[in-house]
Image: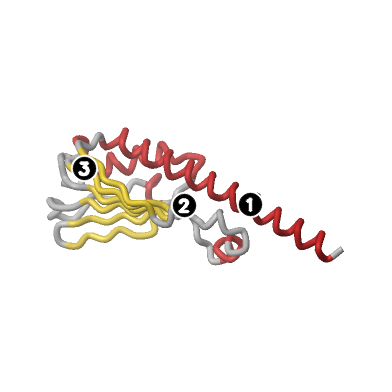
Amino acid sequence: MILVAALAATLVLILLFYWGQRTNLKRAHRLAVLLETLTDPEEVEYLWLGGVLGFQARYRAPRRLKSRPLRITLLLLPRHSPLYLPIAWLRNRGDRLLLTLESGVRRRPPAVPSGLASHLHSVEHDGDTLTLDLQIPWRRVEPLLQETVQWLASCS
């Protein structure tokens, strides 16, 4: 009886691992395609973080951001780890996106629009760089990213 319960628990953990892995990969792909479409970069460089935890990207000369380099870091919840996922939820962690606009942001950025402000963890303006830390609402990620890219384009 104990063996059957252990096998059933193992099977559930394996299925949840594959569900979480697939979900994170789909979300990372969706976000990468959206950001490339919205910024129209000349050259793109990606680095996977653990295969399913997100990615780091560097967009060189995005046309819609006045050809300033953009660094992107996507950090996803550990959906592939069903034993740690409830702990991450209790800590109020969500999927996060860090956007860093480099070189050329010398003046203070304009006021953050209200649609963007509700998902914003922080905005850091440090010399020539501007960093946004966003929590991603997956149900309305496209309008949020459109508003974010428009706001970043106005920060010159």
* Circle 2: residue type: Val
Residue at 44%, 41% (x, y): give it. 141
Name the element at disc 1.
helix
Q: Along the line of sight, which residue is nearer the eye, 151 or 100?
A: 100
Quadrant of residue 63 in the image? top left
Name the element at disc 2.
loop
Q: Along the line of sight, which residue is nearer the eye, 155 or 11?
A: 11
* Circle 3: residue type: Ser
Quadrant of residue 144 in the image? top left
User: Dot 3: few (<14), some (14–19), or many (≥20) neighbours within 10 Å?
Assistant: few
Q: Is residue 126 left or right of residue 121?
A: left
* Circle 1: residue type: Leu
Residue 93 is situated, as x and y percent measured from the top left of the image, at 50, 61
Residue at 64%, 53% (x, y): give it. 14
Residue 50 is situated, as x and y percent measured from the top left of the image, at 43, 57
Q: Going from the N terminus, do you reach mark 2 or mark 3 first?
A: 2
Q: On residue 52, which mark appears?
A: 2
Q: Is residue 42 left or right of residue 73?
A: left
Q: On residue 117, which mark appears?
A: none
Residue at 19%, 62% (x, y): give it. 126
Q: In this picture, is 122 found above or below 18?
A: below
Q: Is residue 83 left or right of residue 62?
A: right
* Residue found at the far front of this picture: 3
| CA distance for labels 1 and 3 | 42 Å
| CA distance for labels 2 and 1 | 14 Å
| Residue carrying label 3 | 154
User: Dot 1: few (<14), some (14–19), or many (≥20) neighbours within 10 Å?
Assistant: some
Q: Going from the N terminus, do you reach mark 1 or mark 3 first?
A: 1
| Residue carrying label 1 | 16
Residue 66 is situated, as x and y percent measured from the top left of the image, at 16, 39
Name the element at disc 3.
loop
